[in-house]
Image (spheres, rainbow, N blue to C red):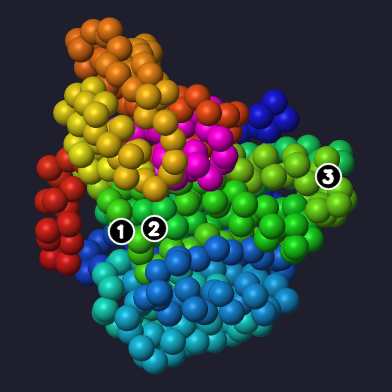
């Protein structure tokens, strides 16, 4: 992190990127519900998508662009309706959106990416969508405010916008990576009802960008969970337009590759944590670190199992150091480990406490444990004493408000 500078902004932080947001009336309220990102120059592109076999029309569209188009140059996003389970009409809607953007921006139709989030099963109101696009194009701006407006427009049950940006020096040139995302519910490993858009002015080979994006998503977005539901619309898109004019980052140029990898990793990881910490109805971010594992995969499976345990999440909400629930979740995870070697600690700004030693209750103060668990964020450190590998997963507590939010989501 010493080489990475955290800066203000999101998708408009990198050179050559503009954004806009408008109220198209999709949600039938006064909030902005459509956003656009546009690059002055064509972008090399990488993307990862939901593993749900039921996937939305824009996911199908974007997969094709990422895998088969020479470049991308714009993204259009709507909130309110997911355009999922919409059949041929949903596919036609994607094509109409791309055609409209293509004409207005004078860019190829197959350089237009799409994102939708909201209620599954509803058709997009194309009159409103196309009118929204026509309003977005003349509103495009490279200002911080434009990026923030875009980040707010893609929200559904999110309580706050989510943006991160960093810069790093590569070959004497300042390279910037910025991004925005949305997500608060239907969040589970293998991504979530989350949309994430990363912009960068780096010169980078597409093979290098795809490789690092795939690897980083595995350790960031695929390590978060709010409610155990894997969405139909999960999308992470990374666009790099080369306007920083650095020497091209390649897989073979290890030093530059690693530096850029760290910058992209920071942005994606921080955005992941923002989603986990904004889970529907939650009161805190819950981080689970599994350390001293035999393999990385073992550590990931155990960390995910603990962070997704509903009983553990309820205990975190109640500020209850009920470590038996954590050990139980590890036991049914499918990972092999020795329960009699496990140590568990809780940590927050209130301090750190050992609650389990060698699989048994440690001599700890329940009052101190409750104090630690009353803060935000909370970290559980699980030491399985079998090797040198580690992994981290992120989630949140499970509260009464989660039920309230999802009981009337469509109303």
Residue 134 among those drawn in magenta: no
Occupied quadrant, residue 348: top left
**Is disc 2 in contact with disc 3, using a CB cutoff of under 8 Å?**
no
**For residue 266, side relative to residue 189 (left or right):** right
**Is disc 2 in contact with disc 1, using a CB cutoff of under 8 Å?**
yes
Most foreground residue, 91 or 54? 54
The residue at 20%/39% (across/down) is: 311
- The alpha-carbon separation of the residues under discs 2 and 1 comes to 7 Å
Most foreground residue, 109 or 252? 252
User: Looking at the image, is 188 positioned above or below residue 46?
Assistant: above
The residue at 31%/32% (across/down) is: 327
Give the residue number, with chain letter if any, for mark 3: 254
- The alpha-carbon separation of the residues under discs 1 and 3 comes to 37 Å
Occupied quadrant, residue 29: bottom left
Give the residue number, with chain letter if any, for mark 1: 229
Label 1: element kind? loop
**For residue 249, side relative to residue 296 (left or right):** right
Give the residue number, with chain letter if any, for mark 2: 192
The image position of residue 110, as x and y in percent, is 62, 82
Label 2: element kind? loop
Mark closest to the chain's N terminus, 2 or 3: 2
Disc 2 crowd rating (10 Å Cα; few below 14, some 14-19, many 20+) is many
Please identify, in this view, whether the residue under mark 2 or under mark 1 is nearer the observer.
1
Q: What stretch is highlighted in magenta?
A: 282-304
Disc 3 crowd rating (10 Å Cα; few below 14, some 14-19, many 20+) is few
Label 3: element kind? helix
The image position of residue 140, as x and y in percent, is 55, 63
């Amino acid at each position: 992190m010493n080489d990475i500078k955290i800066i203000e902004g999101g998708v408009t932080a990198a050179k050559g990127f503009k954004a806009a947001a408008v109220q198209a009336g999709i949600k039938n309220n006064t909030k902005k519900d459509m956003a656009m990102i546009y690059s002055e120059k064509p972008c090399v592109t990488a993307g990862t998508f939901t593993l749900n076999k039921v996937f939305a029309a824009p996911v199908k569209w974007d997969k094709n662009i990422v895998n088969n188009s020479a470049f991308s140059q714009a993204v259009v996003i709507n909130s309110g309706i997911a355009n999922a389970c919409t059949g041929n009409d949903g596919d036609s809607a994607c094509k109409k959106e791309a055609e409209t953007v293509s004409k207005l921006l004078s860019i190829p139709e197959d350089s237009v990416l799409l994102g939708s989030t909201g209620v599954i099963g509803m058709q997009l109101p194309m009159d409103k969508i196309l009118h929204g696009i026509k309003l977005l194009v003349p509103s495009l701006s490279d200002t911080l405010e434009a990026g923030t407006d875009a980040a707010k427009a893609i929200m559904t049950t999110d309580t706050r916008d989510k943006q991160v940006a960093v810069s790093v020096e590569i070959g004497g040139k300042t390279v910037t990576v910025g991004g925005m995302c949305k997500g608060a519910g239907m969040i589970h490993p293998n991504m979530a009802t989350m949309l994430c858009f990363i912009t960068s002015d780096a010169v980078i080979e597409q093979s290098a960008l795809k490789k690092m994006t795939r690897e980083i998503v595995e350790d960031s977005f695929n390590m978060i969970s709010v409610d155990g539901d894997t969405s139909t619309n999960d999308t992470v898109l990374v666009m790099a337009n080369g306007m920083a004019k650095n020497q091209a980052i390649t897989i073979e140029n290890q030093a530059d590759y690693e530096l850029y990898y760290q910058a992209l990793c920071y942005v994606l990881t921080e955005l992941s944590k923002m989603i986990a910490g904004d889970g529907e109805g939650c009161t805190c971010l819950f981080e689970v670190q599994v350390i001293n594992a035999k393999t990385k995969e073992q550590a990931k499976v155990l960390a995910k199992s603990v962070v997704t345990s509903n009983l553990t999440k309820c205990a975190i909400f109640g500020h209850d150091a009920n470590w038996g629930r954590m050990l139980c979740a590890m036991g049914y995870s499918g990972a092999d480990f020795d329960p009699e070697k496990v140590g568990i600690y809780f940590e927050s700004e209130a301090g750190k406490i050992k609650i389990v030693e060698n699989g048994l209750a440690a001599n700890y103060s329940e009052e101190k444990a409750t104090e630690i668990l009353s803060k935000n964020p909370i970290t559980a450190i699980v030491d399985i004493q079998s090797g040198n590998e580690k992994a981290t997963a992120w989630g949140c507590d499970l509260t009464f408000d989660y039920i309230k939010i999802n009981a009337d989501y469509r109303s």
